[in-house]
Amino acid sequence: MNTINMLRLVALAAIWGGSFLFMRIAAPVLGPAVLIEYRVLFAALFLAAVAWLMRRRKGGAGAAPLDLRQHWKHYLMLGFFNSALPFLLFAFAARTLSASVLSVLNATAPMFGALVGAVWARQGVSARTGLGLVLGTAGVALLVGFDHVSERPGAALAIGAALVAAFCYSIASQYARSAGAVPPFANAHGSMWAATLFVIPALPFFPAPGEPTAGIWAAVLALGVLCSGIAYILYFKLIEEVGTTSALTVTFLNPMFGILWGAIFLHEVIGWHTLLGSGIVLVGTALVTGFVPSFLRAPAARAK
């Protein structure tokens, strides 16, 4: 991973860590359904504009076409499990939980992925993976157990919703690995339109409880264009440059930025439980995913 890709990775982590800040700002005013409908719609429109510009610049040979006739079921599957449902659940949780707690709960997705993968492939869980799962669970319990937000009404339901959202990401990840090859940009573009369709039926049942201000609209726009549209482009560029495994290390950086943005902009308190709980979750995630930093692998490689 060269300097440019490292900068892309840090930028992506900062953007995705900021998504919890923006949801925490906008969800109490717009409610989860209205907020997420705007998020995925703005992302879909942005990606459509990018695709049009790429085709125009390259004479019609730019971004991969959606090819809806062949891949519409694929986009619906990704749109539901990778966007619509987890976005709604996180937005629901954001009405109660802090941005820092949300970002750490999101980091449990790779741990759920290990369990889903074991069931999907019908393979047992190794001792290392089991230890990682135990540590991850302990880290989450420590974080939410000592955080004052756990005392708020509805906190238990919000925590459960955030964990189910992380579980949805693991389902989407396993599905994507087994599905037929679809270009990454088309995956992002098509799934955003599918998510837009999925959220529409929820709108009459969950109207916005308040009137959005200019600041709320700015947060919504940032969620759609920055945290979904631009972030996807960065993520898929990283996958292309350094591979899926290296790109997945963004999982370890997201909580750091989620905690940082929450402290700076929302004045959330960073206690010992925040740092310790986050650290334990990340160590558990590293064990589950088998992630080893390159500077630790280098001596072994040189010894060979």
Image (tube, helix red, strand yellow):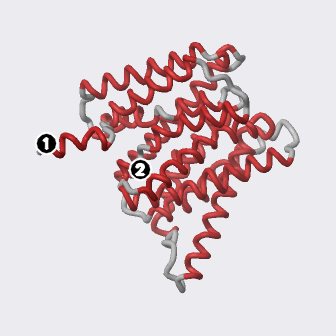
Within 10 angstroms of label 1, few (less than 14), some, or many (20 or more) residues? Answer: few
Q: Amino acid at mark 2?
A: Ala
Q: Position of residue 136 (x, y in %)?
A: 42, 24
Coordinates of residue 23 in the picture (x, y in percent): 69, 39
Residue 106 position (above or below residue 232) = above
Secondary structure beneath label 1: helix
Residue 108 got which mark?
none
As drawn, the residue found furthest toward the left would be 304
64 lies above or below 296: below
Taking 123 as reference, is 71 above or below it? Answer: below
Q: Residue at x 18, y 40 (%)?
A: 300
Q: Quadrant of the C terminus?
A: top left
- Is residue 212 rendered to the left or right of residue 38? right
**Residue topped by disc 2:** 247
At horizontal 24% and vertical 34% (from top left) the residue drawn is 123
Q: Secondary structure at mark 2?
A: helix
Q: Amino acid at mark 1?
A: Ala
Q: Is residue 279 left or right of 45 when viewed as pictured?
A: left
Between the residue at mark 1 and the residue at mark 2, the CA separation in whole angstroms equals 26 Å
The x and y percentages for residue 154 are 69, 20
Side of 257 where 170 appears, left or right: left
* Depth check, front residue: 55 or 278: 278
Residue drawn at the location 53% of the way across and 30% of the way down: 104
> Which mark is nearer the camera, 1 or 2?
1
Name the residue nearer the viewer: 7 or 86.
7
Where residue 303 is drawn, which disc sits there?
Answer: 1
Residue visible at 62% across and 17% down in the picture: 147
